Image: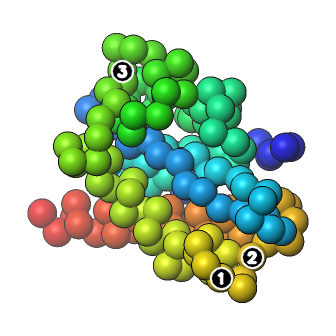
């Protein structure tokens, strides 16, 4: 699946910090029919709640690698938490990664973000009549949402820092 250059996302991101932690997860959706599954892979910064990288694809290590390659270099130094899906262990540097179950709570923010996506983007709802008929429209809708979401998170983060 052809995907665009991720550089458009960088202007929406707050600068990375040395103690940043990333939470990674994948979200199931479909295009056309439920037989045509597509997975959204997301890397979310725990401090800012911004999505620093994303990629649509299957659940393979190659797609996980594509997500890692889209990450801005400053965020590639961050420690990462993910679920127990083996693709993460194959791709992420071992010294920067810990796989954990949901009960540990280390991926709570990215799991909550997935719920936000399902609530706000009708085509990501599991049982719906609102679905993408093409991969291109799926990508466009998510990209538009993500730019707005990251911009809003940057403003709310800056406001909370100023209030301290």
Residue at image mark 3? 96
Label 3: which secondary element: helix
Q: Residue at x 67, y 75 (%)?
A: 123
Residues under numbered marks 2 and 1 in contact, where contact means CB atoms less than 8 Å apart? yes
Spatial separation of the CA atoms under disc 2 and disc 3 = 36 Å
- Front-most of 135 and 154? 135
Q: Where's residue 31, x and y in %?
A: 79, 64
Mark 2 crowdedness (10 Å alpha carbons): few <14, some 14-19, many ≥20: many
Chain-order first, disc 3 or disc 1: 3
Residue at image mark 1? 128
Label 2: which secondary element: loop
- On residue 131, the disc is 2
Q: Residue at x 32, y 27 (%)?
A: 98
Q: Residue at x 72, y 55 (%)?
A: 37
Is label 2 or label 3 in front?
2
**Rendered view: 151 above or below 127:** above
**Rendered view: 102 above or below 135:** above
**Rendered view: 55 above or below 144:** above
Q: How many marks?
A: 3
Image quarter in which the N terminus is found: top right
The single residue placed furthest to the left in the displayed view is 164
Label 1: which secondary element: loop
């Amino acid at each position: 699946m052809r995907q665009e250059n991720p550089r458009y996302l960088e202007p929406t991101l707050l600068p990375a910090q040395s103690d940043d932690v990333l939470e990674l997860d994948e979200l199931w959706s479909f295009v056309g029919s439920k037989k045509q599954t597509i997975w959204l892979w997301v890397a979310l910064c725990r401090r800012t709640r911004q999505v620093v990288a994303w990629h649509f694809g299957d659940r393979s290590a190659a797609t996980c690698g594509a997500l890692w390659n889209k990450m801005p270099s400053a965020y590639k130094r961050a420690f990462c938490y993910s679920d127990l899906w083996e693709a993460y262990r194959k791709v992420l540097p071992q010294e920067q990664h810990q796989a954990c179950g949901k009960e540990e709570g280390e991926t709570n923010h990215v799991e909550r973000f997935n719920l936000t996506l399902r609530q706000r983007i009708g085509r990501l709802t599991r049982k719906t009549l609102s679905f993408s008929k093409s991969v291109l429209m799926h990508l466009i809708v998510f990209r538009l949402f993500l730019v707005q979401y990251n911009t809003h998170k940057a403003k709310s983060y800056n406001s909370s820092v100023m209030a301290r």
